[in-house]
Image (spheres, rainbow, N blue to C red):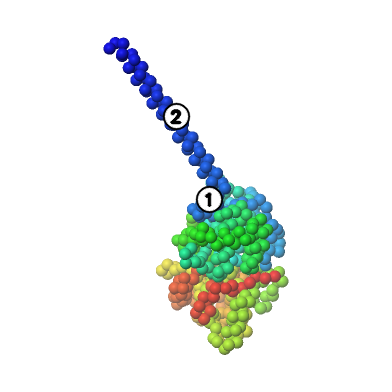
Amino acid sequence: MDDKAPTVSRLNRLARNIRVAWGVTGFFALLVIISWGLVAWMWSSAVQPASIAQRAQHLLPQRTTAPASACAPAALAQAPEATASPAVSTAEGPTAEAGTQPGLSADLATQLNQLASTGKPFQFDLFVMSKCPYGNIAESVILPWLQAHPGATDFRLWFIASGDASSGFDSLHGPTEVAEDLRQEAILSHYPAKLNDYLSCRNANYSDDNGWIVCATQAGLDSNEIGALAHTPETANTLALDVQHVQTLGVHVSPSVYLNGQPYNGSPFSLPQNAQANTSCNPSGGQPASVKAILDPDLQAKLDQLAADGQNVHLELFVMSLCPYGNMAETVLLPWLGTHPTGVDLSLQYIAASNGSDFQSLHGPDEVTEDLRQLALARQYPAKLNDYLACRSANYSDPNGWIACAVNLGLKPDDITGLAQSAGTAAALRASLGRANNLGVQASPTLYLNGSVYNGAIFDIQQ
C-alpha cells in the first residue's frame, strides 16, 4: 500500500495538469474563433451595402469641394456658391445681405456654431421633399456648413411622403418626387460617398424629371444601376422607415430642421434681399431684373381655362402672414385676380396654433399680429385688402411696414390696431385656424382650388 500511494498521487497530479491544459487550449481556441468572427463581420460591413437599420440613420457623407453653383435652384444659382466660415466661434454662413445667393439663416448658424463649440457631436435632422425648391435651398446652405465642421454633427436626411412599401408612396409633388426620393435613398444606401455630388447637381435641375440621369453620370454613377436599385424592395423599405419616422414626429413642412431631437422653429435659410423684393405685387414698386416670382405656368393655364369656360373660380390660400413663400404666392395670384374681376374670389386662411385666448405662429408674435391685422381689414375694409396685401408683401419683414401700407390706402393705423385687437377678429382667426386644422394644412403656402387641394407649384422663381 505504501508503494502504491506515490503512484496514485502522481496520477492525480497528471490528471489535473491534463484538465488545466485542455482548459487553456479551449480558451485560446475560443479567442481564435471570436477573432475570426470579428474579422469576418468587419469585412462584410466594409464591402456590403448598408443594412436598412443602418440606413435609417441617413448619415450624409462630407465632401471637400463644391461646384460653383452647387445645391441651388437654377434660377438662383448665378453667383459662386457662398460657404460658411470654418471658424466655429464666428462662422454664420452666407446671409441674404451677403450677395445674390440664399444663405444659412443667421439664427440657425449661431445655434449650430454654439452646439459645435461644445466639442460633442449633436444630432441634426433635415426633413425635405426631394423636389421641393425650399428643401433644395436648405440643402444648399446647410451642406457647406457641414463641410466646414466635419464630425460636428450626426446629420440625417429624411424624406417627407406618405404610404408604405406594399401599397406604394405618395408625395406632395407627385409620382416624380417619390421616384426621386427612392433614387436618393438608393444612392445613400449603396454609394453614400457619391450623394453630395449627386445632390449638388440635382438641386440645380430638380424640376427636370430626367435631369437625374446627367447628375448620376457626373457623380460617377451608372444611371441604369441607380434606376434599378430605386425599384428594389430594399429601397422601398428604407423609404418606408423615413415615412414612419416623419409621421411619428408629425413633420409635414419641407424643409424642417430638428436639433438634438427638438424642432428648430425658424427658416433654415435667408433669401437675398433682392429676391424678396422682386416678389412684391406692388405694381408701382418696379421689378429689378435679376430675380422675380411669376405665376406657375401650369397653374395659370388651369385658372385661365376655368375662367374661359365661364366657371366660378374660388381660391383658398393658406399662409403664414410673414412667411416669404406665402407672400410670394400672394404676389403672383393677386395680379391674375385683378385681370379677372368677375366670377373669381380669393379667401385667405392662416396657419398658426391657438391655446385658449392666445395664439402662436412659426414666425413669432409679429406674425400673429399681422394675421389679426389682415383679418381686421378683411372684415371691415374688404375692398382694400388686396391693395394692402400688395403693399405689405413687399415689406413684410419690417414689423412697422404695415403702417405705411395702411396710410397709403387712407386707413388710420390706430383704427386698424383697435380692430385687430377686438374679440371679433380673434374669433375670426380661430375660425381660420380651425379650417386649416380640419384640412390638415400645415405648409405655407397651400392652395385649394374650388374646394380641392392643388398639388402643383403656385409660383416659379425666374431670372
Horizontal and vertical percent position of residue 275: 66, 68
Mark 1: secondary structure: strand
Circle 1 residues within 10 Å: few <14, some 14–19, many ≥20: some
Q: Residue 127 location in percent, x, y?
A: 54, 61
How many discs mark residues in the rendered view? 2
Mark 2 touches mark 1? (CB < 8 Å)? no
Viewer can see residue 150: yes
Give the amino acid at mark 2.
Thr
Location of the N terminus (image quadrant): top left
Q: In this view, does 164 lie to the left or right of 286?
A: left
| View extreme (left): residue | 1
Q: Which of 98 and 449 is in front in this view?
A: 449
Q: How far apart are marks 2 and 1 (CA)?
A: 46 Å
Residue at 42% across / 67% down in the picture? 355
State which quadrant residue 23 falls in: top left
- Residue for point 53% across, 60% down: 232
10 Å neighbourhood of mark 2: few (<14), some, or many (≥20)? few
Which of the image's four quarters has the C terminus? bottom right
Residue in the image at 61% along x and 77% along y: 298
Q: Which disc, if any, is residue 25?
A: 2
Is residue 255 at least partly visible in the picture? Answer: no
Q: Mark 1 points at which residue?
A: 122
- The answer to whether residue 182 is above or below residue 457 is above
Mark closer to the chain start, 2 or 1: 2
